[in-house]
Amino acid sequence: MNNILESLAQLFGRTPRKPRKDELSPAAQKMYFYKKGQKVTKQQLIDLHDEHHKNSKNKWRKRRWITLIAVNLLFLVSFSLDIQLLEGALTASRFMGFHMADLNSALQVMLAHKTVLINLIIGVVTVFIMWILLGGRTFCSWVCPYHLVAEWAETLHLWLAKRGLAKNYTFHRGVRTVIYVIFALLAIVTGYTVFEFISPTGILSRALIYGPTMALVWVALLLIFEIFLSRRAWCRYVCPIGITYGIVGVLSHTSCDLRYD
Ligand code: SF4
């Protein structure tokens, strides 16, 4: 129970407590105690952190990418061939007739319209159960199309940062919680799902299925910001979808160890 509360507190912005040595994996122990007693520069810590994550990341990366691309292509194929296998987009869809709704999008819609829609409830419950079983945060790394392009942008960011051509400005972890509340309030006050207009997840999903729009310029700007100024900034400091699935992940006890946490 304490672990769940601690995980939720960290999700909403609390600084993670320093782990005891016996709680760390051998690779992490090497990272944290590698130069005990010596002064470690910020860049050395980043390098050690990268080294620590390299093996496990590479092992799963191919599988994640294939799954992510396959899921998103299934929307496109289904729409293009009109086979009604997977209809809609990531925010709201029907898989073989079953309603599915992104949890955050559904919440935004209900707050904006101040009504509880039965199809959304069915979709939310279906998706909630699915991600409880799979581990909520797996949505990010195995399904979200922005995760894929942000990962590529991150690789470029690291390459540029090593050469002094990019910065990594960081912000307080609680910023994302404040933004979560702001988007919820904006939906209530304006009657529009404001977040959906700027969500790169929804923009990329719809662009892939229905064709590119000007909204892709916004996604490009986000990526440029992440490449040159702040590593994985959208996922770390803004995305309410990440918080929502993070909560599901904590509840399912199987949340993914994402690198930007
Ligand atoms: S935090 Fe948001 S944008 Fe980032 S991978 Fe998760 S759902 Fe996608």
Image (cartoon, helix red, strand yellow):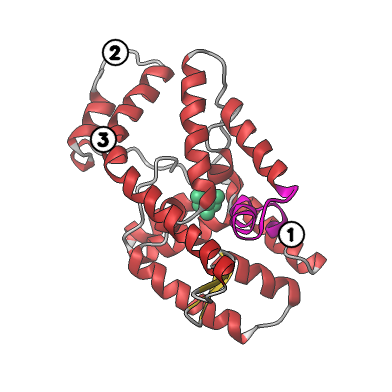
Quadrant hosting residue 185:
bottom right
Considering the numbered disc 3 on the image, is that residue within a helix, a strand or a loop? Answer: helix
Q: What distance separates the C-alpha of mark 2 from that of mark 3?
A: 26 Å
> Which residue shows up at 26% across the image and 17% down it?
35
Label the magenta part by its dominant secondary structure. Answer: helix
Q: Which residue is mark 3?
A: 55
Q: Quadrant of residue 197?
A: bottom right
Q: From the viewer's perspective, is 188 left or right of 127? A: right
Residue drawn at point x = 40 percent, y = 15 percent: 41
Q: Quadrant of the C terminus?
A: top left
Q: Quadrant of the N terminus?
A: bottom left
Q: Tell me residue 48's x, y (percent).
A: 32, 24
Q: Earlier in the sequence, mark 1 or mark 3?
A: 3
Disc 1 element: helix
Q: Which residues are magenta?
A: 194-215
Q: Amino acid at mark 3?
A: Asn
Where does the image place residue 79, in percent across and percent down from the top left? 58, 68
Label 1 or label 2, whichever comes before in sequence order: 2
Residue located beneath label 1 in the image: 194
Q: CA distance from mark 1 to mark 2?
A: 49 Å
In the image, residue 164 sits, relative to residue 58, either above or below, namely: above
**Residue pictured at 77% horizontal, 66% vertical:** 192
Residue at the spot of label 2 = 38
Amino acid at pointer 2: Gln
